[in-house]
Image (cartoon, helix red, strand yellow):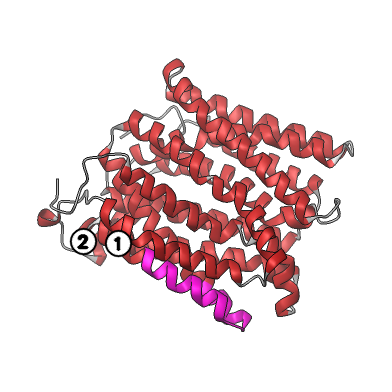
Amino acid sequence: MPDAPVVSSWWRFPLALMLLEVVVYLSQDMYLPALPVVQQWFGISQASAQLSIAAWTSGAALVQLVTGPVSDRFGRRSVLLAGVLCFAVSSAACALLSSFEWFLAARVAQGCAGIWATSAGYAAIHELFEARTAIRLQAWMNSVTVLGPALGPALGAALLLVGPWQGMFVLLAACTAGLLVPLWKWVPETVDLANGRVLSARRIGADYVALLRNGPMMCLLGCWCLVFMVMVLWAVSGPFMLRGRGDGQGAFVWAQMYGCCAFIVGTRLVDRMLDLYPRPLMLALALDLCLLGVAAALAAALLRAPAWLVIGLYGLFMVGSGLLLAPLYRAVLERAQQDMGLRVAWVSSVINVAGSLACAVAALLEVDHLRSFSLLGLLAVFGARALARSRRGLAAAPV
């Protein structure tokens, strides 16, 4: 183990990473109720307001392709801490800039910094722990970090009641600055810096090409991304789909909290399911539950059922996704042999590209009806299930 400060209490590192992820997710989810306000503030269209979500995810997708290999060479700890510092600075910039173009640029920087920090942390998690422990630990972390999506909209709506929307970015900058000291103390180094390979653009490019050509890995990663895209599509379209329901903003907040609670239920099932079923069967069952949820929600929406019933059925999808994502993430990583930082960077970058595509779909189609959302969700989950059941999907053995 490297010489960086490593504490004897193993739980402190996952706790530090969970706290960081909650703040990073808040930079998206706390901002969601402000989308209509931002639209009016800058005098832009609904599509442009939604692109401020896509700007965050596009920045997150690109930077990791560089920072992942850098963390393999110079260590997870230094890359993570640099990302945290940059995230605090870019959050403050989002609050201060008055031009929508510069605001978008700050959102790109915020996405870059937040995700490069957390991806370095996850690379360390999967290096420190064996597969079953890492899956259980990541499921627990997911159940905590989902508090960002669960409570973020409520917190954002509350902040809008007492001040301008820029206040949420001031809060993000302050929380991130407060995390610097515990992160400095608790985050270990998992890379042997003395034996690190020299950075080579040619080698890194060859590694990424190899990952792109890795059929079993890309098949499962595509499955992960399609399920994630449904979640993103809900998050960015929910404020507009529920805008005419009661007080609109409050309806979305409650719906988002319900969905995140359903996701937490799914993550809590991971421990039990790992003990009862082989991982491929467990993942297949989770995908079937996701498909049942979106199919039932679409049927209810087509029958013009009350919105609360459609949202309630969508909760089945969220339970399935909570059960699916942590073990599927580990399965994706196990299907490659490259350095862990590069693998995590590739996986996280592809996931964030998928998130950007989901934001673009929401913006281009202006998804503002539960029927259209449920139909798109059904198509995505059906595609994910087909990939998982293909010859290169769950049936393929890890490398």
List the single residue furthest toward the left: 194
Residues in magenta, as a range: 84-106
Q: Which residue is mark 2?
A: 74
Mark 1 Cα within 10 Å, few/some/many (few <14, many 20+)? Answer: many
Main secondary structure type of the part rendered in magenta: helix
- Side of 47 where 155 appears, left or right: left
Q: Position of residue 15 (x, y in %)?
A: 38, 45
Which quadrant of the figure contains the N terminus? top left
Q: Residue furthest top?
A: 276
The crowd level at tag 2 (other Cα within 10 Å; few <14, some 14-19, many 20+) is many
Magenta stretch encompasses residue 86: yes
Q: Do labels 1 and 2 touch, CB within 8 Å?
A: yes
Q: Which residue is mark 1?
A: 79
Q: Is residue 3 in view from this perspective?
A: yes
Q: Quadrant of residue 204?
A: bottom left
Disc 2 residue type? Phe
In the rendered image, the residue lying farthest to the bottom is 99
Secondary structure beneath dot 1 equals: helix
Residue placed at 53% from the left, 40% from the top?
223
Magenta-colored stretch includes residue 295: no
Kind of residue sitting beneath label 1: Val
Q: Position of residue 361 (x, y in %)?
A: 67, 58
Quadrant position of residue 255 = top right
Q: What whole-number distance in Å separates the C-alpha atoms at marks 1 and 2?
A: 8 Å
For the C terminus, the image quarter is top left
User: Sequence-wise, which precedes: disc 1 or disc 2?
Assistant: 2
